[in-house]
Amino acid sequence: MVQHDHGTNARAGTYRGKSGIAQFIALITELTDGALTTDVKEILGGDEYATVIETATGKRQGQELNLDVCTLYHVNNAGAVDEIHIMPLDCPFGISSGHDTRAHACRSVRVIFWRGDAGGGGDPERAFWAAMAEVRPLASAEVELVVSVLGLARLHQGDGFYLVAWERNEPVGHAHLALTDPPELQDVEVRLEYRRRGIASALTARAEDEARTRGFDRLCLTVSVDNAPAQALYRQCGYVDAGVAPKRVMGTIEIRSGPIEVDDTLLTWEKRLSDSAP
């Protein structure tokens, strides 16, 4: 088992075997000044997959974390981890020693927080906080609650559905998946107090899974030419320029909450889902 964290920061390096995993987790605790701690229960290693059963605890921005999780690492042919999944063990699927851990975790995973081949590396602390969020399709009975804190601007668009990220029954972000051809990721929004915790990445990953299960081999999106943070997020998630000319959007647009005036230039990006199938 080899774990490699990309980048030039203090976390970068290669960690081998069970002792290496323990070293890596200890380093995360040190770098967060104890804001995040992990109690490792068991490490099960293989040539292609390794699973760590652990309890993550911490507190950040007023949010407390106390979560039993299964972290699944995928190791590529070069011997480096290129994908990491985190799944709370108290989710409806669960994992026990009686299951095929590799296959079961791949089906049940809630959050894909880092793909090494997407560039940019991942942030382990953000990963554990993102694991607190459950992403699921918006139910009609939840609309009133969600719309009280999030925009749901495309609620009545009629060509797709919303995915909502929840933390302990509190909606913290959403994304709209338009089932066009190709499908399009739209209206990704995360509440201000929950940003920089991996929520947008979790929403994007779930939208990719939803598109893939419906037989689509790519997902596209548009991003403002001036929105550098969003571009950085999507680039890290593996999106590239689709070869479509930038589109100028001007005038009045009707959304759920009423008309808005826009003046923007949009870039069209896409991701080939067949390249990232679990």
Image: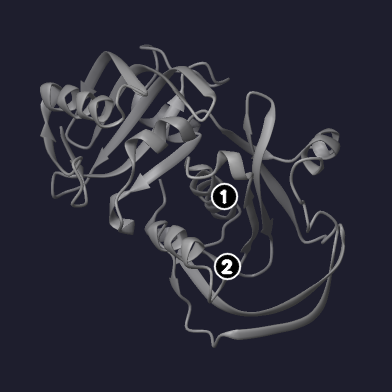
**In this rendering, position of residue 23 left or right of residue 171:** left
Give the residue pinned by disc 1: 213
Pinpoint residue 267: horizontal percent, then vertical percent: 54, 77
Mark in front: 2 vs 1 = 2
Amino acid at dot 1: Thr
Rendered residue at 66%/47% (across/down): 174
Answer with left or right where residue 151 lies relative to residue 50: right
Q: Residue furthest right?
A: 258
Tell me residue 186's x, y (percent): 65, 61
**Above or below, 27 relative to 81:** above
Q: Is residue 227 left or right of residue 168?
A: left
Q: Nearer the viewer, residue 172 or 159?
A: 172
Task: Identify the residue at horizontal 45%, vertical 58% (top origin).
Answer: 233
Rounded to the nearest angstrom, the CA distance separating label 2 from label 1 is: 18 Å
Left or right, 212 with reference to 254: left
Q: Residue at x 53, y 84 (%)?
A: 244
What residue is pinned by disc 2?
221
Q: Earlier in the sequence, mark 2 or mark 1?
A: 1
Q: Position of residue 64 (x, y in %)?
A: 51, 20
- Residue 11 in percent (x, y) is at 20, 40
Residue drawn 37% across the image and 24% down it? 35
* Label 1 environment density (alpha carbons within 10 Å; few <14, some 14–19, many ≥20): few
